Image (spheres, helix red, strand yellow):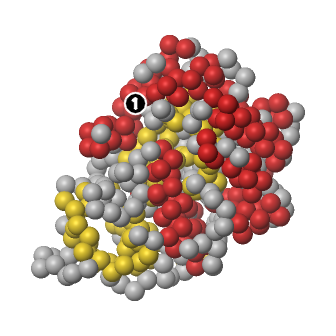
């Protein structure tokens, strides 16, 4: 198969023919081949590398009413996301080898994009050993900070060279009802100290401010990485303080948000992740709304919109939502850019036409969005994963179960 269009390659946009064989990009050429090509050469259409979202909640199990692996990965495919990394705060919790194996079986028969699983801090030491056969790394929540097994898990991950993703909010502050920026900074300080002292490989997820980034940078030579989310870039509590916009960590003051947005092109952020956290509309609209909202179908368009408004370079989009996250989880040999030898994961977007974000059109079960009504660019036209169109012109073209666990994919194909 050969695809023609303007593609994001080597930090620029190039008019190329991308030849794909056995799910891999075999050749990228400027010359028109004799074979038939799939044409995406229209004005305003750009081919990006497939996006990688390292923070999503696919729910399923007893919370399948909020989202399941099929609907969650449909949302991913429609949002140009080819790999989703699933969080373990499920019901039941994904922190035992038994639940982990069950979750992997369920995912592997349901998903239409590739996935990785994070494991929760287990209740017993024994449940740590061998989790990496299925899961990619461990996710640490504030309630885990004082668990004696935390150090055990950090040491285990260090020995096995596995990733630890941290939700940075101090549990004592949370207990006292304070979730301001100080609560986040205290938690970041704790984990960068652990990384510096003991050499743990820590990734700080959903940081909300420039202060958080600068603090984390103190440990950049110790491998500490971080991501932020579209809602911390665009929304703040001054304008969006209703219960409906509840999320953890909470939206910040306007000046904190504005500073983060304006610094994005100048300050090193390793990745953007959505924290796709679906809840039903009823749960969001009740008296005590659940925190979080879906993000998979809006993230790439939001980044493209930020590019259109001059906040980002076009290359930054791929750097922040494809190559950057691929590097964080250590799969950049295989994913993250349009390059010969890498997986044929591609996203075709229309960056010319403006449209309104309308959550009633979402494929996620969570038909709501804090970005509802926003004018955006970058509607996804097609998403290809390992050489197959998974999503094209509004249709899903693969069977449930097409996607696979990144653990198996990297073992089988890329050592
Ligand atoms: C998350 C969820 O709903 O699972 N919600 C959120 O506001 N981010 C929980 C979490 O990741 O802390
Ligand atoms: Zn989350």
Q: How many numbered circles are shown?
A: 1
Q: Nearer the viewer, residue 341 or 235?
A: 341
Image point 63% across, 59% down: which residue?
A: 268
Q: Nearer the viewer, residue 219 or 235?
A: 219
Query: x and y percent of residue 98 in the render?
Result: 44, 20
Specify whether 380 is left or right of 391: right
Asked whether the viewer can see residue 3, the reply is yes
Query: x and y percent of residue 244 in the render?
Result: 73, 53
Image point 62% across, 18% down: which residue?
A: 149
- Give the structural element (helix, strand or loop) at label 1: loop
The answer to which quarter of the image holds residue 31 is bottom left
Please name the residue that numbered disc 1 is placed on: 134
Q: On the rendered image, what quadrant is the C terminus found in? A: top left
Q: Is 221 rendered above or below residue 394?
A: above
Q: Is 144 rendered above or below residue 379?
A: above
Query: x and y percent of residue 300 in the render?
Result: 52, 64
Label 1: few (<14), some or many (≥20) within 10 Å? Answer: many
The answer to which quarter of the image holds residue 78 is bottom left
Image point 52% across, 23% down: which residue?
A: 156
Image point 67% across, 17% down: which residue?
A: 148
From this viewpoint, which residue is outermost toward the bottom?
A: 43
Specify whether 401 is left or right of 350: left
């Amino acid at each position: 198969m050969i695809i023609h269009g303007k593609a994001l390659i080597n930090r620029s946009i190039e008019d190329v023919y991308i030849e794909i064989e056995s799910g891999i990009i075999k050749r990228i050429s400027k010359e028109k081949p004799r074979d038939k090509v799939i044409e995406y050469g229209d004005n305003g259409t750009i081919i990006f590398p497939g996006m990688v979202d390292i923070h999503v909640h696919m729910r399923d199990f007893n919370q399948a009413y909020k989202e399941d692996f099929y609907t969650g990965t449909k949302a991913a495919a429609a949002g140009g996301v080819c790999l989703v990394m699933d969080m373990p705060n499920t019901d039941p919790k994904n922190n035992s080898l038994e639940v982990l194996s069950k979750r992997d079986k369920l995912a592997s028969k349901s998903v239409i994009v590739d996935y990785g699983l994070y494991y929760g801090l287990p209740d017993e030491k024994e449940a740590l050993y061998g989790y990496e056969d299925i899961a990619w790394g461990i996710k640490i929540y504030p309630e885990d900070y004082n668990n004696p097994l935390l150090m055990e898990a950090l040491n285990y991950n260090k020995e096995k060279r596995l990733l630890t993703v941290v939700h940075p909010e101090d549990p004592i502050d949370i207990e006292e009802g304070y979730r301001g920026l100080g609560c986040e900074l205290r938690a970041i300080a704790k984990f960068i100290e652990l990384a510096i002292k003991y050499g743990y490989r820590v990734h700080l997820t959903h940081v909300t401010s420039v202060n958080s980034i600068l603090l984390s940078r103190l440990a950049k030579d110790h491998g500490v990485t971080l991501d932020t989310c579209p809602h911390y870039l665009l929304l703040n509590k001054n304008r969006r303080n209703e219960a409906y916009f509840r999320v953890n960590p909470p939206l910040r003051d306007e000046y904190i948000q504005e500073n983060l947005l304006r610094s994005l092109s100048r300050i090193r952020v390793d990745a953007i992740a959505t924290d796709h956290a679906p809840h039903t509309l009823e749960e969001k609209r009740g008296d005590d709304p659940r925190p979080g909202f879906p993000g998979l179908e809006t993230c790439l368009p939001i980044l493209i919109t930020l590019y259109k408004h001059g906040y980002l370079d076009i290359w930054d989009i791929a750097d922040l939502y494809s190559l950057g996250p691929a590097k964080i989880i250590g799969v950049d040999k295989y994913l993250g850019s349009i390059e010969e030898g890498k997986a044929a994961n591609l996203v075709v977007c229309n960056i010319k036409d403006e449209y309104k974000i309308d959550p009633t059109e979402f494929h996620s079960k969570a038909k709501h969005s804090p970005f509802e009504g926003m004018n955006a660019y970058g509607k996804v036209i097609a998403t290809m994963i390992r050489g197959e169109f998974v999503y094209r012109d509004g249709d899903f073209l693969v069977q449930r179960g097409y996607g696979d666990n990144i653990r198996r994919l990297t073992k089988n194909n890329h050592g």
